[in-house]
Image (spheres, rainbow, N blue to C red):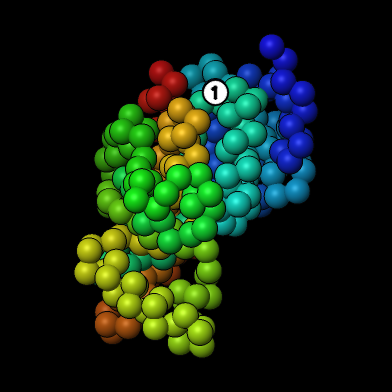
């Protein structure tokens, strides 16, 4: 059955990709695609920039999701309609655990659902959990590459400035109290798309995982510890691509 061109992402099912790499930033799509064989621009609509390439002789898609849950949910839903079944988010995050340094890779086994999108899918008690096969491939890829990596829970939020300037928010006391709770529970890092990806994929019957590049760690800065900054997600990209090869192989 041929799928008609999908309303938001602007493509049909002619691409043939079963696996998609999902950066948030449209400007990062070409950078990732250039690491694949035969990279080529495919489509652009709204925040969804799409390139195609190949790994182990199979077509792979790279598509941006934009920032946050709503655009991620729409993108994943429509990619699934077009035939994609495996999703790997290639993103950035801010460290929370003091052992997490800028430049490290965080592989998210699950996510705290501190965002609004997934509440319109399933009640909040349902966990946002990565697919085990995808996670194992990401862990194996990071070990193979020799990159410093961490595997565990991340916090997924809607408000960037709610995290970085909570005291000026009317909900600031609640935000700061929860932030301390997540840290006590050994949450590794904070970002904005993982829980939506996991919940939507779970409900659709797709597989999903996340490789996140740590930009910096505000808790290390607050504690007066060294706090290297890293704005190049090269390691997370390499880990995601190698994991895709493992899954497709």
User: Helix or strand or loop: what does disc 1 sit on?
Assistant: loop
The quarter holding residue 190 reads bottom left
**Tally of numbered tags:** 1
Residue at (58% x, 29% y) in the render: 80
Report the quarter where the N terminus lies: top right
Which residue is found at the position 51% from the left and 26% from the top?
85
147 sits left or right of 36 in the view:
left
Q: Position of residue 161 (x, y in %)?
A: 53, 75
- The residue sitting at the top extreme is 1
Q: Is residue 166 above or below residue 138?
A: below
In terms of image quadrants, where is residue 53?
A: top right
- 117 relative position to 173: left or right: right
In percent of width and height, residue 96 lies at 32, 68
Residue 24 in view here = no
Residue 39 position in % (x across, y down): 65, 31
Against 168, residue 85 (above or below) is above
Quarter of the picture holding the C terminus: top left
Q: What residue is at 54 percent from the left and 53 percent from the top?
A: 117
Name the residue tied to disc 1.
18
**Residue 128 location (% of width, % of height):** 38, 46
Nearer to me, 210 or 234: 210
Up-down relation of residue 126 to residue 84 (above or below): below
| Foreground pick, 238 / 4 | 4
- Residue at the limit of the structure toward the front, as seen here: 123
143 or 74: which is nearer to us?
Answer: 74
Tell which of 132 and 21 is nearer to you. Answer: 132
């Amino acid at each position: 059955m041929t799928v008609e061109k999908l309303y938001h992402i602007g493509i049909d099912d002619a691409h043939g990709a079963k696996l998609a790499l999902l950066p948030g930033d449209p400007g990062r799509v070409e950078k990732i695609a250039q690491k694949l064989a035969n990279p080529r621009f495919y489509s652009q609509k709204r925040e969804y920039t799409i390139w195609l390439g190949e790994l182990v002789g199979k077509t792979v898609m790279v598509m941006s999701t934009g920032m946050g849950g709503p655009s991620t949910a729409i993108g994943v839903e429509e990619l699934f309609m077009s035939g994609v079944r495996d999703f790997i988010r290639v993103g950035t995050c801010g460290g929370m655990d003091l052992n997490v340094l800028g430049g490290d890779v965080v592989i998210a086994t699950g996510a705290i659902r501190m965002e609004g999108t997934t509440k319109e899918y399933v009640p909040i008690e349902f966990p946002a959990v990565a697919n085990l096969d995808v996670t194992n491939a990401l862990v194996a890829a990071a070990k193979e590459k020799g990159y410093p990596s961490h595997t565990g829970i991340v916090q997924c939020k809607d408000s960037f400035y709610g995290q970085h300037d909570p005291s000026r928010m009317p909900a600031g006391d609640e935000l700061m109290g929860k932030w301390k709770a997540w840290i006590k529970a050994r949450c590794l890092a904070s970002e904005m798309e993982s829980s939506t990806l996991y919940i939507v994929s779970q409900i659709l019957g797709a597989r999903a995982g996340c490789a996140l590049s740590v930009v910096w760690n505000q808790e290390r800065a607050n504690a007066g510890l060294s706090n290297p900054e890293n704005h190049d997600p090269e390691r997370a990209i390499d880990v995601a691509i190698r994991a895709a090869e493992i899954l497709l192989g």
